[in-house]
Image: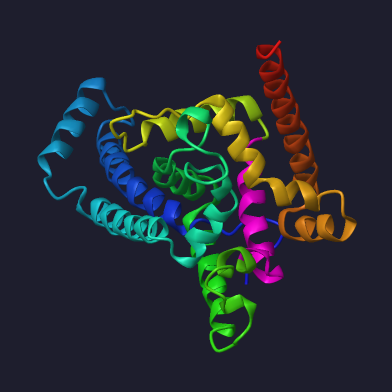
Amino acid sequence: MIATIKPPRDSFKQRHHTAAFAVLEQFANGLVEYAKQHDGSVSADKISKALAALREQENLFDGAWMTLETDIDTVKARQNAAVRHDPFGRLLVSRFAHLLEGREAGDLEHGALSREILTPFFKVIRMMVGVDMLEEIDGEIHAIIDQHADEDDELRDPTDYWDHLAEEPQVANRLNLVFARMALHFKDYERRKQWMLQLVNDNLPHGDHGWVFTNEHCVRLLRALFRDVRAALPIPERAAELAAKLGGENVENLRNVMATLDRDVAAIHSREAANWE
């Protein structure tokens, strides 16, 4: 089950750290050996020559590249599955599906989110939450779905299936944890929001219309994603559950993030009202 107090070490990042450090270690060891042979000193010229020698080793980065290549394939498979609406991906998107074009939000000209946002959205989630946690929760949600596989009840109604599943307590708690982890990255709210705007726009598979992810889009998206986190914080029992998973200090951080987001929402509403005057 999911670790409490602090998130599990993201082995995806750890593997790349280890691979990269192995290369640096080879370089450092070479300099150390040279220093031992020359009274503890290494000249700038020797460092340049050592770097040139490393360039001659064609297989030097093979191990690091194999690690990276394998993980890239894993990430692409997970991303493509999410775009194809696998259960976990579909449930994550359910939090803001009403903002997508063609639904209640209407068309792009009236502020709807382009469906092109799905690819960068999953990238943001992976970077903020971590691949390990996502894979763990993905497995848990599949297990929950399997529990209902033979039941002839409303959970299996094809019309209401996804909405109902997203509200099922075990599933909702796991989704809430994902978005709580994401929200914690917004402690420096404005800086993180600008980072997200840049990342999403840089990773949009732009079509003919060249849709742009704006500040208003971002604020409305964050409000939808963090809806249940905000709702949980005033309820002592649910806030205690978050504290057990994230730590008490992080629950206070979440309160501050929600307050900052609410002020941002209010500012947008104020600007919109002024435009109608």
Residue reaching furthest to the top? 277
Where is residue 188, by image quadrant?
A: top right
Picture colour scheme: rainbow
* Percent position of residue 241, x then y: 79, 61
Which residue occupies the foreground of this view, 197 or 106? 106
- Predominant secondary structure, magenta span: helix
Q: Is residue 6 visible?
A: yes
Q: Is residue 227 magenta?
A: no
In this image, 195 relative to 55: left or right? right
Which residue occupies the foreground of this view, 249 or 100? 100
In this image, 154 relative to 260: left or right? left
* Percent position of residue 42, x then y: 29, 27
Figure quadrant of the C terminus: top right
Where is residue 32, by image quadrant?
A: top left
Q: Is residue 183 magenta?
A: yes
Q: Residue at x 48, y 43 (%)?
A: 124
267 is higher (above) or lower (below) than 199: above
Q: Is residue 2 visible?
A: no
Q: Residue at x 66, y 39 (%)?
A: 223
Q: Residue at x 43, y 46 (%)?
A: 118
* Percent position of residue 267, x then y: 71, 21
* Percent position of residue 84, x then y: 38, 60
In this image, 6 relative to 98: left or right? right
Figure quadrant of the N terminus: bottom right
In this image, 51 relative to 126: left or right? left
Residue range of the region highlighted in magenta in the rendering: 166-186
12 is higher (above) or lower (below) than 206: below
Which residue occupies the foreground of this view, 76 or 224? 224
